[in-house]
Amino acid sequence: MPKRVLSGKVISSNSNKTIVVEVTSRVRHKLYKKIISRTKKYHAHDENNNFKIGDNVSIIESKPISKLKSWIVIDNISKGEMETWYKCNLIYLLQIILEQEKYNA
């Protein structure tokens, strides 16, 4: 199973070698079909304490490091890179949906 990669905003960097990243995802409500934004907080490992509050970062899933930490920070994402990252993910998701439709047909 491939490791998940998420991107979000750093909301806390008070702990040593740990940051809290808030990831916002948009989902469609099952009954009402309205698009809702859901936010979730992930504790991520930051080895050198490089990231500060407000930075946009991408994180990757890893083995559990502590009770709460099972994510590692990959890199800092600037605003322009963030937009291209979202576009790439949308294209990737569309490809997966098309492949599933081929297998189901």
Image (cartoon, rainbow, N blue to C red):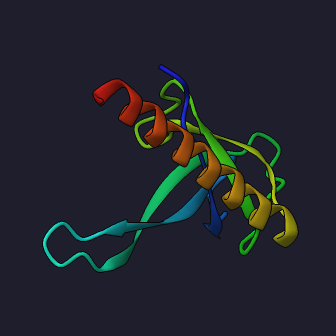
Residue at (29, 80) in percent of width and height: 34
For residue 87, above or below residue 92? below
Q: Looking at the image, which residue sits at the far top?
A: 1
Taking the image as shown, residue 6 lies to the left or right of residue 31, namely: right
For residue 89, above or below residue 87? above
Q: Position of residue 51 (x, y in %)?
A: 79, 59
Residue at (76, 67) in percent of width and height: 83
Q: Position of residue 95 (x, y in %)?
A: 56, 40
Query: Quick one: 67 or 38, which is closer to the camera?
Result: 38
Q: Position of residue 92 (x, y in %)?
A: 61, 43
Q: Position of residue 21 (x, y in %)?
A: 58, 60
Quarter that holds the C terminus? top left
For residue 103, above or below residue 66? above
Residue at (86, 69) in percent of width and height: 80
Residue at (35, 77) in percent of width and height: 36
Query: Quick one: 9 or 96, which is closer to the camera?
Result: 96
Taking the image as shown, residue 98 lies to the left or right of residue 87, namely: left
For residue 24, above or below residue 36? above
Taking the image as shown, residue 54 lies to the left or right of residue 101, namely: right
Q: Quadrant of residue 104?
A: top left
Q: Quadrant of residue 4?
A: top right
Q: Quadrant of residue 46?
A: top right
